[in-house]
Image: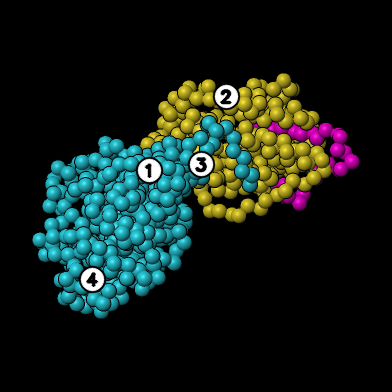
Amino acid sequence: MTGGTRPEDMRPHDAEDEHVPLRVALLVGAGPSSWAVVNAVAAAHEVVCLLVEPRESRQALVRRRLRRLGVATVAGQLAFQAVAVPVMARASRRRVRDIQQRSGLVATPPALPAVLVSSANSDEARAALRASKPDVVVINGTRILDGTTIAAAGAPVVNVHAGITPSYRGVHGGYWALLEQEPERCGVTVHLVDTGIDTGAVLAQALITATDDDSFVTYPWLQLAAGIPLLLDVLQQLRAGLVPHVTTAASEHRPLRYHPTLWTYLYGRWLLGVK
Amino acid sequence: MTDDVIMRKGPPGTLPPGTFTVSLDLESYWGVFDKRTVASYAAHLDGIRHAVDGMLGLFCRYGVRATWATVGLLMCSDYDEAAALAPAPAARPRYDDPRLSAYPLLARRDRSLARYLFAPDLVERVRQREGQELATHTFAHVYALEAGMTPEAFAADLAAAKRVGDARGVSYSSIVFPRNQYDDTTLRVCASAGLHCYRAQPQHTLYRPRRDGDQNMLVRAGRLVDAHVPFVDRSVRVTAGGANLVASTATAFLRPAGARSGVADVLQLRRVLAELRRAARCGTDVHLWWHPHNFGAAPEHNLERLEVILRHARALSCTHGLRMMTMAEHTARRMTEHTVWPTTEGTA
């Protein structure tokens, strides 16, 4: 089984094909941030395939995390999502709208034919990817792809990750970077996808600056606002026949990030002012 | 990695950046000789080298520029050098309370105490690190406001401190007064001795420089509460004191924590971090000070706590341009910004 797309395997367009649109397959989760990625890519390139994976059921997610993190941590995470996130989401509506408008993000469902797949690693998803013969596959908000799916793509698979890898893998990398007092690592990464969790070669990174109006629920939008132009740059380079510059990130033994527990969040906000 | 900055609130540079200054009173046993026996304080004194190394490591890692106000006697190699550089007996302070004088301790020449009294290696370690300022904490940890001290005796003590500095290749521009005792007369003496800045106390009754005997329970309790739940106005003002000596006003004393964090430790930590954020956002100043020997009894825990503060300061330096400065740099910067307030302070 392959370990994913390696930088040397990237197959950009021939330089002669510069005026031929890049054929992009999109494999995304259902949600506003994925719609923003899809709409931005569709505006610049030919979308040959749009596969949408439904959200993983909450019960399945909780069971998986219970096995990995234990009862106390998962209870704290659920409390955080049940209590703190809705309050922040309500308070940050205007700020999110502001970020979307300023950055030209269109977070509404795209007017494109989409195929709903049961899982990004399902046979139907692999068959659709194989059949569409894309030049590149862009993913966002899906579960971790396995080697068979990556191989089925037959093209580089690229992800926009909300965090600076390899320091901040997992979810909400912007928040964790601020909590750990590393604003110089609060940002977004465009990387090649392999079978690990956000471990692929880095193609581009950008930092974000959080204002006093930002919080846990707006950092991902700031990251997307910075990450989508990076993604489009990478795609443009592929279209122009260039191999994007690949950074082999130094390996760091840092834990995979999950949602904070309610008490971690409250303590960090009280002590360090990280919202 | 690109360095894109998006959506910063307000144009950058509309406020002068805030500053973060650290000053330390490096004194070892000379800081407590009139209050504690060596036996009762040995744990703190034994841990001081480890604590200083830890602090220097953290300062280096987080780009902190600190001022180390050092007792002159501590810079001496041994009793002989201390005696040779000390003021003549007639020029030494003659306190009404003779226990306040360090010279009887020096005269005992107790070999077993020497390691707590002399540490030129410690000073050298500080000197070798970039961005660290050596300041004077007087030669013999003398108290400017205690009965029996005279301007002449204080001047003689500063001259001795300068002799030690010269012997070690160190010149001073800043002074921190032992027990924070100073008045206008003392400031004029310091200016005459070629010093340019000093660490001042916040302008509030609780922090008014006073004799040790005047530190009543009410004052101590007030400061204790203020350290954890601040109520004193801490808008730092660089003040032109006597003879134009410039003040860098201390905003917080970092109280030592025990081996385990208590509520008070966390409250104080939060207060310091909040002050740093305010300084970064509003362009004000934070000046944190402590004694390295305070860390000695529980160095690991205190260094961990210090690291939280320094990480926060470094993060604010990245995001808001908070600037780390020694006392000399801080006062020089404020002078060039023409923010000197023409008030007199420090009258006892």
Please name whichever residue, B238 or B152, is drawn nearer the observer in this view of the structure: B152
Q: How far apart are marks 1 and 4 (CA)?
A: 35 Å
Please name whichever residue, A230 or B97, is drawn nearer the observer in this view of the structure: B97
Tag 3 subunit:
B
User: In the image, what residue occupies the spot 21% across and 42% down?
Assistant: B206
The chain displayed yellow equals A
**Left or right placement of residue A165 versus residue A234 in this view:** left
Question: Which residue in the protein does label 3 denote?
Answer: B319
Disc 1 residue type (three-letter) = Val
Task: Tell me, yes or no, whether the two marked residues, 1 and 4, touch with CB atoms within 8 Å.
Answer: no
Question: Which residue in the protein does label 2 denote?
Answer: A98
Question: Which residue in the protein does label 1 denote?
Answer: B340
Residue A106 is drawn in which quadrant?
top right
Image spot of residue A86 (x, y percent): 46, 25
Task: Tell me, yes or no, whether the two marked residues, 4 and 3, touch with CB atoms within 8 Å.
Answer: no
Residue B87: which disc? Answer: 4
Per the rendering, the colour in which chain B appears is: cyan
Q: How far apart are marks 1 and 2 (CA)?
A: 42 Å
Please name whichever residue, A49 or B206, is drawn nearer the observer in this view of the structure: B206
Discs 3 and 1 share one subunit: yes
- The span shown in magenta is A1-29
Q: How many other residues sit within 10 Å of disc 1, few (<14), some (14-19) or many (≥20)?
A: some
Residue at the far right: name it.
A16
Residue B165: which disc? Answer: none
SS label for mark 1: loop
